[in-house]
Every structure is written in C-alpha cells, then in structure tokens.
Image (cartoon, rainbow, N blue to C red):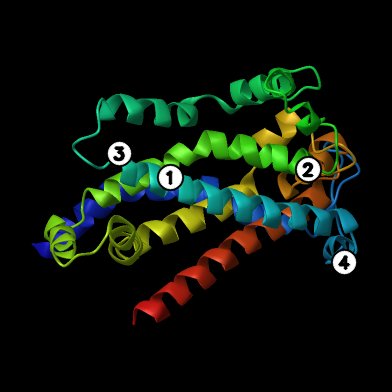
Amino acid sequence: MKRNQNGIGLIFISPSLILVGVVVYFGIAYTFWGSTREWSDIRSPSTSIGFANFEKMAQDPTVYMALKHILIFGFLTVLIQMSLGFFAAVMLSGDTIIARNIHKTFIFLPVIISPAVTAISFRQLMSPDGEINSFLRFIGLGFLQQEWLADTRVTLFSLVIINIWQWTSFSFILYQAALSQLDQEILEAAEIDGANYRQVITRIIAPQLKGTHLTLIIMGFIGSMKTFELPFLVTGGGPAGSTEFLTTYIFDQTVSRFKFGYGSTLSVLLCILSITFTVVLLRNSRQRNM
C-alpha cells in the first residue's frame, strides 16, 4: 500500500521534476558545455577550444574588478539591510505602537515596486540637478552635493543606497515573522530579572534569530552576485567600469559583443561562486550549532 502511494506521489510530482530538469539543470549543463566552445556569431557552428576561455578569464582584469564590486556591494547592502530591518521589526513588534499595520505597509512598499521604475526614479533623483542635490542645497548642505551617478568614487555607493532603500523591507518582513514565533515567556522572564531593553534585544532576541540571520546573509550575497537590473538600468556598468558586475559583464560579452563562449564561462564562474558560498556558509553554521 505504501509503495503504491509513493508511486502515485511520484507521478504527480514528475511534471515539476521534468520541468526543473530541463529548464534548470539542462541549462546549467549546456552553459558548462558552451564555456568550452567559441562562436564567431550565433548562426555559425561552434568550435571546441578546451579551457581557453577559462585561461582568458583568469587574466581578465574586468573580472577581478567586478568581483571587487560584488564584494563591496554585498557586504554593505547585507549588513545595513539586516540592521535596519531588524531594528524596524523590533520597534514595530510592540502592541502599543499606533497604526502599526500602516507603518508596516509603508515599509514594505519599496520591495513591490518594479526595478525599472526604481531605476528611472533614482536616475532623476541622483542627477546633478536632481532632487537630492536640490534638497542638500535647500537645507544648507550644498557642500555634500555629488555627481551621484557620474563620479567613479561614489557611483557604486549610490547603487548601494538604492538597493538598501528597495530591499530593507524584505529583511523587515522575515524578522517580523521570526519575532512572532519567539516565546514571549522568555522575554517576560528577562524583564522580571531586571534586563533592560538593550540587553533583551542583544542577548535574547538577536541570538534566537540565527536562522533568519543566516537566511538573509545567504540570500543577500547571492542576490548581490546576481544583481543585474540595478547597475544595468541606472549606470550601465559605468562610468569607466566603476559599477561593473559579473552579470553586466556577462550581458556585455554575450549580447553586445556576441562572445557566447566567453559569456558562458563567466556564467559558470557566477554559478560556482554562488554554490560555494552557500555550501561554506551552511557548513560553518552547522558546525557552530553542533
């Protein structure tokens, strides 16, 4: 009877397994195969070149520059988004907050806005004569004006600000869900024992949300590696490559320059980095919890 039930279950999930196998795993395998080939254009047959594309990638300074940008972007966005999301979730977790649901709605709004709309809006806001510089002049801080999207020294950090604005609400929602699962008796006992608000947050609440912290770190860094819409629509990877990411470089090599083999090689690198980062982080987390 149990064997029949397992067979029926397999029949029902087989369409999903086939879809995932064809779309995801076949796509990954084809990309690996394509990384060993070279095309002159999409209509011409490919030729095998072995690992020449990987050798080229190892000597490509743009790859290292893109990896540096991903590291800076990922570290800043993950750290600040988690901090702001956690703080907002704790602040709005009390029953005494007036119009709490309205506050939650406004915090969550940025994450549902299309990246294209966000990019166009911030391109206007951060233009030399845009609203941000106008506001700085209005409040007497004109010396802080910047060419936010044209100065190579600040452009990457401008993208960090935009990403934080859009995705902090995602951290907020996950922390809100995690806080709702905490045992309130532990918090009440801590207050009875004389723990102040800061101690309750740092020594009781934060340690119990390790799973949420880990989830946000993994998703945040993988999201940083996959970031494409923001740099592509706001800066196009410029100026002078100051916001070049692996994804924008892949697009440039594959679509703009028709170097499909090299673009596949860069995609393989992106896939390996994402998998390696996730495996290492999960393994370290399990060792600490043992």
SS of the residue at dot 2? loop
Closer to the camera: disc 3 or disc 4? 3
Whole-percent x and y of residue 162?
A: 62, 34
Say if mark 2 contacts mark 3, CB within 8 Å.
no
Q: Residue at x 27, y 28 (%)?
A: 101
Say if mark 4 contacts mark 2, CB within 8 Å.
no
Q: Is 170 above or below relative to 191?
A: above
- In the rendered structure, the answer to whether residue 110 lies left or right of residue 172 reads right
Q: Residue pushed farthest left? A: 1
**Disc 4 target residue:** 55
- Of labels 3 and 1, earlier in sequence is 1
Badge 3, how many Cα within 10 Å: few under 14, some, many 20+? some
State which quarter of the image contains the N terminus. bottom left
SS of the residue at dot 4? helix
SS of the residue at dot 1? helix
Q: Residue at x 75, y 43 (%)?
A: 156
**Disc 3 target residue:** 92
Return the mark for residue 243.
2
Residue 6 seen in the figure: yes
Quarter of the figure with residue 271: bottom right
- Mark 2 and mark 1: span between their CA atoms? 25 Å
